[in-house]
Image (cartoon, rainbow, N blue to C red):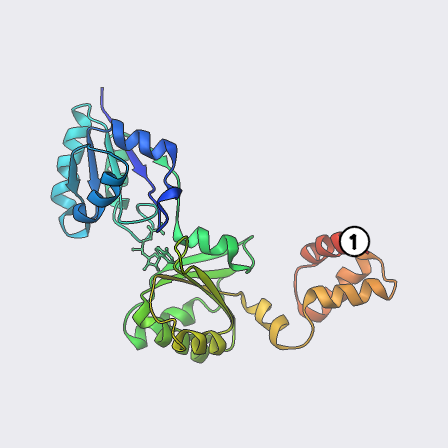
Amino acid sequence: MAGTLYIVATPIGNLEDMTFRALRILKEADLIAAEDTRHSRTLLAHFGITTRLTSYYDHNQKLKGDLILEMLHAGKQVALISDAGTPCISDPGYRLVRDAQAAGITVVPIPGACAAITALSAGGLPTDCFTFAGFPPNKEGKRRSFLAALASAQGSVVLYEAPHRLVATLDDIVTVLGERRVVVARELTKLHEEFLQGTASDVRQQVQDGRERGEVVLLIAPADATVQQSEGPTAEERLQAALTKGHTVKEAAALVAAATGLPRRELYAKALLMRERL
Ligand code: SAM
């Protein structure tokens, strides 16, 4: 019988975020395929995991992918990990998953930390819908086109960025998207974790004032959220005012929808909660 390929999430900084299931799978596997074996050896040593380790990264994925598939066909259990977080999310792994599935091998995800989801969960921007776009291109021209293509993206935009390019990317956000509200989620789950929030220019300034290091996730608010932010009262303030004046929940939602262009259903739900608190 063929083995199983496990896609195992590991912590993004705080080792306490390792899951019990991930530990068991990594201990029980015949082989762990890691993006960087030297990096992963430290993590595995911390948890007393002595499973055989091999490398699987972008440049050897064809060769290593074939070897890993052979082992799976021979009935071995293989666990794939990346340097941090969830494999395949801006990390190597997708081709291995695709090829394993095509070869009839069972692929099992072992969920855990992911920087994008961690940032969204505490970033304070709308999360009902979001667009994850990975790393922006390094070169200014391509980065600006990339941002322009995201101008009409649905919901919040989630980006990964290298710390030394963050100021340049925030500059390009101001140029291409205007003063959108952004959140820079820095050093998530680590000692110096922080969320820098404000307009793109504000946050650019905060980054320049001594926060140019550390890993970051960059969140960009949807265009309609920016309109509320920069042009007068927020939707919540408008709803509150309408309810206080004696309008019904339905009327308040309709009035604010007309004024802001925000979806009436969403406003109705918010107004309902507010009225309960009045
Ligand atoms: N697969 C990983 C995941 O699930 O989050 C992401 C890998 S990607 C190569 C690395 C990028 O994730 C970093 O450049 C940074 O943008 C983001 N990242 C990873 N760890 C982070 C952390 N602790 N705090 C903030 N961002 C982090």
Q: Is residue 128 left or right of residue 62?
A: right
Residues 99 and 3: in front is 3
Q: Residue at x 27, y 33 (%)?
A: 26
Q: Quadrant of residue 131?
A: bottom left
| As drawn, 270 above or below 87 | below
Q: Where does the image place residue 153, in percent across and percent down from the top left?
A: 48, 63
Question: Relative to 71, is 144 on the left or the right?
Answer: right
- Image position, residue 23 (x, y; %): 32, 33
* Residue position for label 1: 277
The answer to which quarter of the image holds residue 168 is bottom left
Q: Amino acid at mark 1?
A: Arg
In the displayed structure, 162 sits above or below 66; it is: below
The residue located at (23%, 34%) in the rendering is: 49
Q: Indicate the quadrant containing the N terminus: top left, top right, bottom left or bottom right.
A: top left
The answer to whether residue 193 is seen in the rendering is yes
Task: Spot the residue most to the right.
Answer: 246
Lateral position of residue 160 relative to residue 81, left or right: right
Residue visible at 45% across and 62% down in the picture: 194
Residue that sits furthest to the top in the current view: 1
Ligand 1, by image quadrant, is bottom left
The location of residue 78, given as percent across then percent down, is 23, 32
Any part of residue 4 in sight? no
SS class, disc 1: helix
| Towards the viewer: 124 or 44 | 44
